[in-house]
Image (cartoon, rainbow, N blue to C red):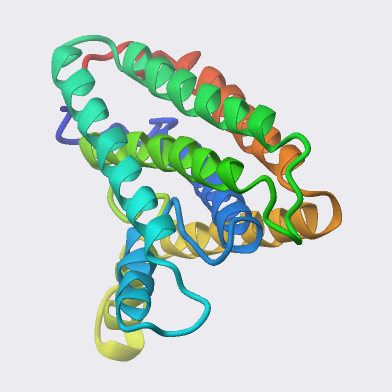
Amino acid sequence: MIADKPATSPLPWLLLLLSVTTGLVDAISVLGLGKVFTANMTGNVVFLGFAASGAPGFKIAPYVFAIASFMAGALIAGRVGKRHAGSPLRRWLLIAASVEASLLWIAAGVAVGFDVATQMPGTSVYIIITLTGLAMGFRNATIRQLKVPDLTTTVLTLTITGLAADSSVAGGSNPNWARRIGSVTAIFLGAAIGAYLVTHGGLVAPLILAGGLIFAGTLACTLHPAASKPL
C-alpha cells in the first residue's frame, strides 16, 4: 500500500461518497429487513446478545446471516487485494466497485415484490441480508487496505471521539476536522435519503441507487492520474 497519499488524491472524496451509500444500506437493512445491520457489525453483535437472552422482537438467525456474510465478503476481498498488491490503484478500485455494485443490484432484483410491512416472502429477507452483507464486508476490507485516515466509510465511533478528544477545547489541534465532519454528514445524509426511499417505496430504489453511486463514483475516481499508482 502507499503509505502517504498525495494531497490531490481522489480517495477522500470517493470515501465520502461511499459513506453516503453506507447510510443507504443501513436504512435498507434496519428499516426494511427487521432491525439488522449489514454495514455495521457492532449493532449486530449487540442485537445478537439481545436475541440470545430471549428479548422480544429479536431473532438470532438474521444477525448470524449478516455477520457470516460480512465476514465472507471481507475474506474474499482480503485475498483479492493481496493478489493485486503492486497493481495500479484503479484496477483494485474497479474490481471492488464492480463486486459491491453487482451484489447490491442483484439484491434489488430479489427485492422486487418484497413487502417490507409483512417481511414477505421470508426467504427474500435472508437473501438480501446475505447479498448486502457480502458487499459491505468486501467494502470494509478494501477500505482497510487503502488506509485513508478518518474515512472508514462505515464506523463513526472513533471519528466522533476524535472530533471531541482532538478539538481545541480539549487542548488538541483539530486534525482532519473537515474530513471527520464530512464523514458524519455523509452517513447521516445517506441514512436520511435511504429512510425516505424505504418508507415510501420499498427496497428496490435505494439498492439501485447505492450500487449506482458506488460504481459511478469509483469510475470517476479512476480517471484521476493518482489512480495509476500502485497499491
Q: Is residue 21 left or right of residue 141?
A: right
- Quadrant housing residue 44: bottom left
* Image position, residue 96 (x, y; %): 39, 23
* Image position, residue 54 (x, y; %): 37, 82
Q: Is residue 26 above or below residue 2?
A: below
Q: Quadrant of the N terminus?
A: top left
Q: Is any atom of residue 13 visible in this view?
A: no
Residue, x 41% and y 14% (percent of image)?
Answer: 225
- Quadrant housing residue 193: bottom right
Q: Is any atom of residue 150 visible in this view?
A: yes
Residue, x 39% and y 16% (percent of image)?
Answer: 95
The single residue placed furthest to the right in the displayed view is 200
* Image position, residue 5 (x, y; %): 26, 34
Q: Is residue 113 left or right of residue 41?
A: right
Residue, x 79% and y 60% (percent of image)?
Answer: 199
Residue, x 61% and y 23% (percent of image)?
Answer: 216
Q: Is residue 133 left or right of residue 76?
A: right
* Image position, residue 149 (x, y; %): 28, 51
Nearest to the observer: residue 114 or residue 11: 114
